[in-house]
Every structure is written in C-alpha cells, then in structure tokens.
Image (cartoon, rainbow, N blue to C red):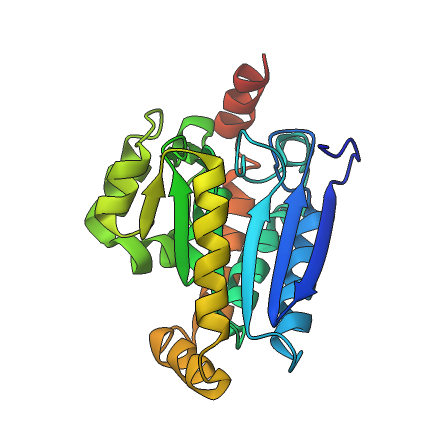
Amino acid sequence: MATTRRNGSLYTHSENHIATVEFGHPSSNSFPSELLERLANTFNTLSADPSVYVIVLKSEGEKAFCAGASFDELISVSNLEEGERFFSGFANVINAMRKCKKPIIGRIQGKTVGGGVGLASACDYCMATEAASIKLSELTIGIGPFVIEPAVSRKIGLAAFEALAWDASQWKNAYWAKEQGLYARVFETISELDKEVQFFAEKVASYNPNAIQAMKQVNWKGTEHWDQLLTERAAVSGELVLSTVTKEALKKFKK
C-alpha cells in the first residue's frame, strides 16, 4: 500500500545478507529533504553493517520509480542558504551511495525524472521494466541537472548525458537507457523484474564479501573529489532557483 505521509516513508529489511531499502512518497515517489537525509543515513548505516553484503534500492508501487526532488519544497526556496541546502539533499545521497562499501542494486519499475535518474546512476547495477523511461527536465524549469551530472555522466557517458539534459522535455525509453549502460537488463513485467533482482542479489551475496568491497572501491576510483564537487554544484543550483526567470518558470509549471 502506498504511503500517504507528507514526508514520505523509508523501510529497510535485511535477510540472508541482503538489505532491501524501499522509499515512497504520495507525489510519485519524490523526495523532500527529510527523506533524502534519511536515505543517506541509511546507506551509511548499511555500509558499516558487517551482516549486509549487498543492498537493493526500490520504491513503492507499480508506477513511477522516482519523480526527483520535492516540487513543493523547491518552489518555497527563498534564499541562497535554503537553496544550497535543498540541492545538497541528492548530493549527500549520491556521495553516501558511492562511498557505501556494499554494492547497490537498483530496481527501477517505472518512470524516473531528474534526481531519480541520479539515484539510478549511483547504483552499481540496475534492472528495470519496459516502463522505466527517464527524463532530465531541469532546464525546463530554469535550473539544470548539475548535482547529478557527475553520477549520470560516469554511468552513461557525456554524450548520452547531453542528449538527456538538452532535450529536457523528452522521455527516453528503457531500451535507450539500457543501450547507454544505465540499465543492465530490462524486463516486460514487474514480477519478472522482482524475480531477477532477488536472484541476482542472492548471487552477489554468495560471493566473497571482501572481494565485493574491493570491486566497489575499484569501480568508484577517481570520484574522491565528489564531496566538494557536488557541494559546489548544489550552490550553483541554489543560486539559479532564486532567479526571476526560474521563479516564473516554476509558477507556470505549477499551473
């Protein structure tokens, strides 16, 4: 059953060395700042838990995987400090995911926008359904996908990132995302997806945990500067969201 909580929900369940993290929000599984903070803390906790070998990240329901950051919270930003804090939400989650010692499997069952694409990109391995189209719509509301860009470009390459970012009003389908490397596998149904995610997570959890952690470290080599980089990007977005052009675009978007 989908959550009705204003600040969303976050549940973690661990069994047989597999931790499943499930988030939800009534607005298409979007993220208010409080929920992003909880998610970052959850990844930090699981990273330090010796009983967890692999993490599955999923969202509630059968429709959208993630609609990005909270729109209501975005339009209420009134000063530079608030703006930087708001955009630091996804920055902190992405940094927690890349520094997490455990591999993160993304289970993407539906459409994902903006910060949701950043989440999928920060996973170590993603599986999706045919319904899992993606879009970076930030330019349409006067900002840009600056915070998530390093994660998205690392995963799919700069050319594919540009194709998404510049064509900000268009969806790219799940097979396009697979061709670019965001998704490793795409399935027709959610039931098929869930079966294969569980099977794959069990396989990874059966490997030498020290080898798994070493693999994760090797794969993320060269991202050590992201703590500073993503903070700088959050400041850029925080400044843009205060501009008159962006405020007008947000008003039109809300209508």
Q: Quadrant of residue 136?
A: top left
Looking at this view, is 61 or 88 the one in front?
A: 61
What number of labels is visible? Answer: 0
Left or right for 37, reference 55: right
Q: Can the viewer see residue 215 in this picture?
A: yes
Q: Considering the image in quadrants, where does the N terminus appear?
A: top right
Give the residue displayed 69% in from the left and 30% down from the top. Answer: 26
Task: Pick out the residue farthest to the right.
Answer: 5
Q: Whole-percent x and y of residue 36? A: 65, 52
Looking at this view, is 119 or 212 the one in front?
A: 212
Q: Looking at the picture, does residue 48 appear above or below residue 159?
A: below
Looking at this view, is 220 or 204 the one in front?
A: 204
Left or right for 77, reference 161: right
Q: Whole-percent x and y of residue 160? A: 23, 45
Give the residue displayed 54% in from the left and 38% down from the top. Answer: 66
Q: Looking at the picture, does residue 235 appear above or below residue 64?
A: below
